[in-house]
Image (cartoon, grey):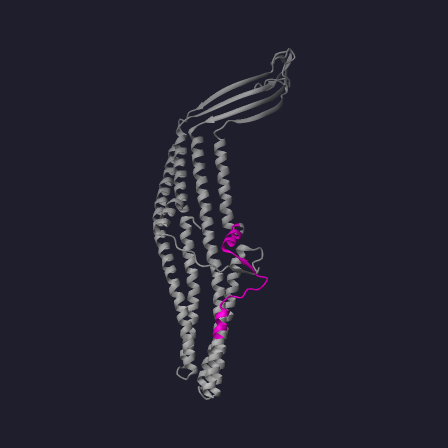
Amino acid sequence: MAKALCASLVVSGAAASAQSAASLAVATPAESQQITLDEAVHLAEKNEPNFAAAQAQAQIARLDHSVAVAGLLPSVTYHNQYLFTQGNGSNDRIGQTTNSAAPRFIANNAIHEYASQGVVNETLGLQQFSAVSRATAQEAQAAAEAEIARRGLFAAVVNLYYGVAAADTKLAVLQRAADEADHFFHLTQQREQAREAAHADVIKAELTQQQRTRDVEDAKLAASKAHLELGVLLFADPRTSFHTESTAPAALPDRAEVEADASKNNAELKSALAALHASEADVLSARAAYLPDLGLNFTYGVDAPQFAVNGPDASRNLGYSASATLDIPVWDWLSTEHKVKQSEIHRDLAKVALSTAQRRLIANLSEFYDEAATARDQLASLDASVTAANESLHLTELRYTGGEGSVLEVVDAQNTLVAAETAQADGVVRYQLALANLQTLTGRF
């Protein structure tokens, strides 16, 4: 009878193991949609506010550059004005008219004055050219900051995406462990009835079963939280049902290739360099206040007592005027000198930031690559640990059903398998996140 019981338990244990292996694949509801990593990143770029703000700032900087370039070009306006002035009671020749009442205000030319003129203005100075240089640098900096935001968003989505995958995997692992604990609990009951095991074994198995049930409930909650956190970035309704794509981890590129890409495509370095160029343009703009500005004006049109091309005596009202103005700064109570010093302080600070960005790039490159290499190398070890833990549990259950092992050995083997499978899921997330962090330095996704 004992041998028959052992045989039946071995068969049922094998069936349970097969069922447990099948349950490792996460079941997805029929209505759940599959989201690839690329799709998740694309959706997050539409919904994440910080990324949207960085993109908007880059567009504003491009428009600022256009405005600065326009400042170098002449402005054209079409000026129209009618001016009425009270007469002073005397007659005088004003403009082309005869016996016209003179205006009371001597600054005005006639009681009725009409102006309709096209005006072209141009100001030439070093400040206008330095403004273009500064706007160019700020546009480059804003573009680099937008790229930093894009890469940071990618790393965040990768973390959440594979966090969802890991949470689903852990749920499947713990569900399988709960099924295994149920099976083992029934096994100890059968052995107790056959007087081959003590009641203490049943109690230990029951406690394990209860703990596994609680673990499944916690895993369901963790998976729900992970789905909601990613759903906030992807969907209008974060409760939308979805599941991630199961893909093999990408290969780690060569270190020399990563270093070459990072030196050319690092967004933090570009941002710091653009900030330095902008600060240098500020210094030039501040020093430009020592130099004169040349103003040019050309006006063509009518400025006469009649709104007409010709006056009453057939004289020509339509004409032009031109002027050139040179404003030479003489004394401003040292305000220009102080502005120059302020801009030089900002420039020196930008140099320090650039130097720090260069050192940080070197450190991050080495740190992120070593992290990714270590995580990649551990994936094979984690897979081997899961295989070994599965085999250990199977053999331990066989020994227990044969009366050669203890219930503590079985429970320990179960815990070891759960820990190995959980570590395997965490190892995949660790490698994917390390790879994403490395990609933020190189721009290669």
Quadrant for residue 237, please give it: bottom right
Q: Which residues are magenta?
A: 16-45
Whether 42 is among the magenta residues is yes
Q: Position of residue 174 (x, y in %)?
A: 48, 70
Question: Which of 276 and 335 lies nearest the eye of the viewer?
Answer: 276
**319 relative position to 255: left or right:** right
- x, y percentage for residue 240? 57, 59
Percent coordinates x, y for residue 112 in the rendering: 64, 19
Does 30 appear in magenta? yes
Displayed quadrant of residue 347? top left
Task: State whether residue 215 appears in this view.
Answer: no
- The answer, for residue 163, to whether it is visible in the render is yes
Q: What residue is rendered at 52% in x and 21% in y? A: 298
User: In this picture, is 266 found above or below 206?
Assistant: above
Q: Nearer the viewer, residue 337 or 376?
A: 376
Residue 102 vertical position relative to residue 44 in the rendered view, above or below:
above
53 versus 25 height, above or below: above
Q: Observer-nearest residue: 156 or 108?
A: 156
